Amino acid sequence: MLNDGERIKLGNKVLAITIALNVLLTIIKVIGGLWGNSSAMVADGLHSLSDVITSMGIIISLFISSKPRDEEHPYGHEKAESIASFLLALVLATTGAQIGYHSINTIIHKTYAQPEFYTIIVAIISVLIKEYQYRITISAAKKINSNAMMSDAWHHRSDAFSSIAALIGIIGSRLGYSYLDPLAGIIVSVIVVKVGIELLLQAVHELMDGSIGEEEIEQIKDKVKEIKGVRDINQLRGRKHGSKANLDINICVDPNITVYEGHRIGDIAQKDIKDNFANINEIIVHIDPCIHKGSYECKQCKRRKV
């Protein structure tokens, strides 16, 4: 995983590209729609302009999340990305619902348009650019572990889907099958709303300090158990904190060692975890005496109970 400076640099680079492309798309779609008698394309162009605002919101969230911890935020500012992801997921789900509403309304009132032939070229350009935006944004999102950018990526893909629907509608209209446009729009609507809800639930999971994956927890346990002096792990809890995670771990050690030695083992555990799991931010290590009575009873130690 990249450090904070590298995360911001990569994220801002990709977002700057998508912003520039959205400005270009806005110009192409609005002019093409006005000249080609396609009000849907004009609306789609204005929607591309709104994407610039959401991308700028991601840039702001990346900047805030990288700020060092302070007295008011002792655990850091990483949740700024979770908030941005939540808002973008809402926008994505709303966008999908609007596509569905517009499509159903078109079918009910039969308000089919007859766009010019060259609007097909504009729609194809839109699909290609939006799919490119999706691919570079999703790739960057995975590299920097940002759900906010993941939501932005799917926002681009939803636009690609809507442009495909518009393309089908334009071709269908010119061939005499005008109903293909709203029908494709309804299918796109279902896909976009589904993705929006999934990303929304993921953002809520982070904002509610949801647990990290069970697989990662087991990997951390295995790594800590390799440390000399660690007899067992009584408890390990991990919670999401934006693009990173915080851990609480209870390590069971020989009750007869010195406080200094127990503290040293805890320091080694912290270092090993951070060296091998780049997404782990804050680690609190509790040292428990390895005895077989009271609240410190080992779970897996095979010594005889006393």
Image (cartoon, grey):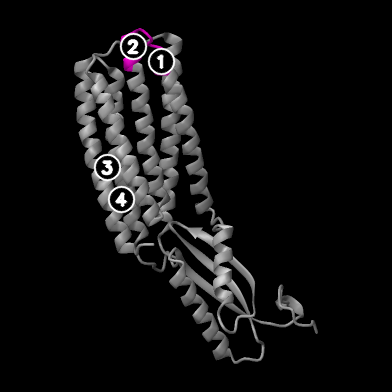
Residue flagged by tag 3: what amino acid is it?
Answer: Thr
Above/below status of 234 relative to 195: below
Q: CA distance from mark 3 to mark 1?
A: 30 Å
Marks 2 & 1, CB-CB < 8 Å contact? yes
User: Mark 2 or 1 closer to N-term?
Assistant: 2
In screen coordinates, is 38 left or right of 200?
left
Query: Cα distance, mark 2 to mark 1?
Result: 8 Å
Mark 2 and mark 4 lie on one chain; the one further toward the N terminus is: 4
- Residue 113 in view here: no
Callout 4, which amino acid? Ile
Residue 117 visible in the displayed image? yes
Residue at 46 percent of width and 70 percent of height = 276
Picture mark count: 4
Q: Which badge, 3 or 1, is on the more N-terminal residue?
A: 3
Residue identified by numbered label 1: 180
Left/right of residue 60 with respect to residue 219 in the rendered view: left
Left or right: residue 106 versus residue 270 is left
Residue at horizontal 19 percent and vertical 23 percent from the top: 31
- Helix, strand or loop at label 4? It is helix
Identify the residue position indicated by label 4 in the image: 59
Residue ID for mark 3? 18
Residue 218: percent from the left, percent from the top? 59, 64
Q: Label 3 neighbourhood size at 10 Å, few (<14), some (14-19), many (20+)?
A: many
Q: At x 34% / y 51%, what residue is drawn?
A: 140
Q: Are marks 4 and 1 in contact (CB under 8 Å)?
A: no
Q: Quadrant of residue 175?
A: top left
The magenta stretch spans residue 178: yes
181 left or right of 32? Answer: right
> Residue 173 — which label?
2
Give, as a single range, the part of the protein colored magenta. Answer: 170-182
Q: Which marked residue is nearer to the observer: mark 2 or mark 4?
A: 2
